Image (cartoon, rainbow, N blue to C red):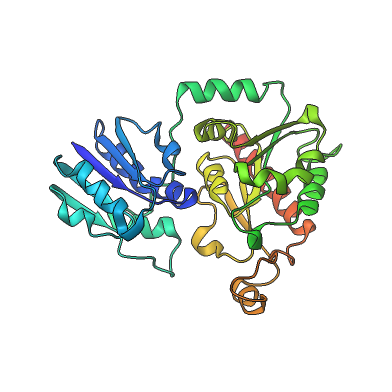
Amino acid sequence: MRLLFITSNRLGDAVLSTSVLRHYVETYPGIRVTVACGPVAAPIFEGVPNLERIIKMPKQKRGGHWWKLWKSVVLNWWDIIVDLRGSATAYVLPGWKRVVLPGNDDDLHRVEQLGKLIGVEPAPLPVLWTRPEDEARAKELIPEDGKPLLAVGPSANWIGKTWHPERFEETIAELTKPGAVLENARVLLVGAPSERDASLPVIESIPPDRRVEIFGTEHLLTVMACLKKADLYIGNDSGLMHMAAASTRPTLGLFGPSREEHYGPCSKWGRAVRTEWSFDKIMANRESYLSKENLMETLPVAKVVASAIQLVKDYRNQEIGDE
């Protein structure tokens, strides 16, 4: 069997879409997979079982990327074509079963919506498959010395949903101080290459011997392998937050000008904490539609720290119960 899986340009949406991919990979062992997606998201699919090909789809004028995709796959027969971008492509390719997402349902979390699309409830959780080389590199980056690991995503692709650097600094200090829940933890800081400068105050607030930073310097699946080691991840609503949730480790997403009911971290140990202001109130009070202001002002450090401590304790209590 062969599957053509067409998914997002954006990293976060692509991570969430692996819920659907997981269903087909696990339902049809040995199914051969071709993934078509944006260049930024492409690396996260390199570990997919029985992967035949990844087709990168950088946007082109007049929909040229769709024409290029059609030409590259039209000579193959597809047992299943999944198009999560709602194009007409699935209907003009030779295949047996077609699954096309018509648009977003604002009454559901995006993963719940994907589960309904494929007729699976509860929806499969997103997953990223890592490779042996990713796991080996993560061991090099994160020493196995018994220290807890706090992973932090202090950046985002939009200033509006980026929590203040000084609040990240204070939160990290509170969680790792003597007697704290992650006492003397090593801190892993992650983000896109273009986001490092904005994250520099957070990076430099942590002693060099206790920090590891990855801002585009490692493969995304190596980042994923590192996130699997974390005792806790805290970060803005971003693609990296969704990766952390897919790692199954405790993940706390920070929300303000985005809706946690649609994009909250989707995993058993994923939690969202939002600003004191609702999404609607934030949107109604921003300076303008094109404003570059920070919209996370009403999320206090104390609220994040309390949520983080409770999440770590709940996770540890579950581990004790499983012994």
Among the 4 quarters of the image, the one containing residue 191: top right
State which quarter of the image contains the N terminus.
top left
> Looking at the image, which residue is at 57% across and 48% down?
241
Q: Is residue 60 left or right of residue 262?
A: left
Q: Is residue 1 above or below residue 7?
A: above
The location of residue 125, given as percent across then percent down, is 43, 46
Question: On the rendered image, what quadrant is the C terminus found in?
Answer: top right
Give percent across and percent down for residue 244: 56, 42
Q: Horizontally, is 90 left or right of 156 in the view?
A: left
Res 255 visible = no
The quadrant where residue 213 appears: top right
Residue for point 46% across, 51% down: 10
- In the picture, measured across the screen, residue 183 lies left or right of residue 316, that is right
Looking at the image, which residue is at 63% across and 72% down? 278
Instruction: Residue 146 in the image: state x and y as whole percent.
Output: 71, 24
Image point 85% across, 38% down: which residue? 179
Q: Nearer the viewer, residue 190 or 132?
A: 190
> Would residue 163 be seen by someone viewing this image from the given angle?
yes
Name the quadrant containing residue 29.
top left
Percent position of residue 322, x then y: 56, 34
